[in-house]
Amino acid sequence: MALTGFFGTYTPRMDDKGRVTLPARYRGTFTDGVMVARGQDHCLYVFTPEGFAEHAASAIDAPITDQRARGYQRYLLANADQQIPDGQGRISVPARMREYAGLVKDVVVVGVGRRMELWDADRWAAYEAAQEADYADPSGLDLG
C-alpha cells in the first residue's frame, strides 16, 4: 500500500514579504492552488483546494439554525485564503494569518496526512515537547 498525503518536517524561512516556500517534494500537489486556513493550536492549515473542500464540507452544509455551527462556519471560511504558488513554490501568508500563528521568520512546515501545518518554530518546539509523553504512551488516547 502506497502512502499518500503529507509527511515530514521542513524548516523554511519566511521572507520580509510574508512568503513561505512549500516543500519541494509536494509542489506538484499544489498546481491547482493552496488553501490556507486558521488551524487549532495557533498554527495555519495548508490544504489542496480539494482537501479544503472536504475539510470544510460539514461546516458549509451545517444548518444555519444552529448558532454554534454558524459560528464555526463563519470563523473557518472568513479565515481562509486561496493562494497560487509562484514559480519558486512560495505562497504569501496574509498579515492577519501571520499574526494569528505568530509567524515572523523561522517557521516549521509539518506534514499531517491530509494537510500541512505552518507553525512558528518556537511554538512548534514547545508543542512537540509537550506531546512527547502522550506519544510515548498512547494507551489513553482516543485515536478513532
Image (cartoon, rainbow, N blue to C red):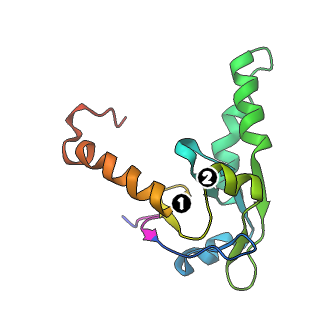
Amino acid type, mark 2: Ala
- Of all residues, the one furthest to the bottom in this rendering is 87
Q: Residues within 10 Å of mark 1 (few under 14, many from 20)?
A: many
Quadrant of res 57? top right
Q: Do the residues labelled 2 and 1 touch (CB within 8 Å)?
A: yes
Q: Residue at x 32, y 46 (%)?
A: 131
Q: Residue at x 26, y 42 (%)?
A: 134
Residue 31 % position (x, y): 71, 74
Which is nearer the N-term, disc 2 or disc 1? 2
Magenta part mainly helix, strand or loop?
Answer: loop
* Quadrant of the rendering where the C terminus is positioned: top left
- Residue 112 visible in the picture: no
Residue shown at 77%/65% (left/top)?
A: 83
- Mark 2 lies on residue: 101
Q: Is residue 13 left or right of residue 140?
A: right
Numbered badge on residue 136: none
The magenta segment is 3-9
> Is residue 1 toward the left or the right of residue 39 in the image?
left
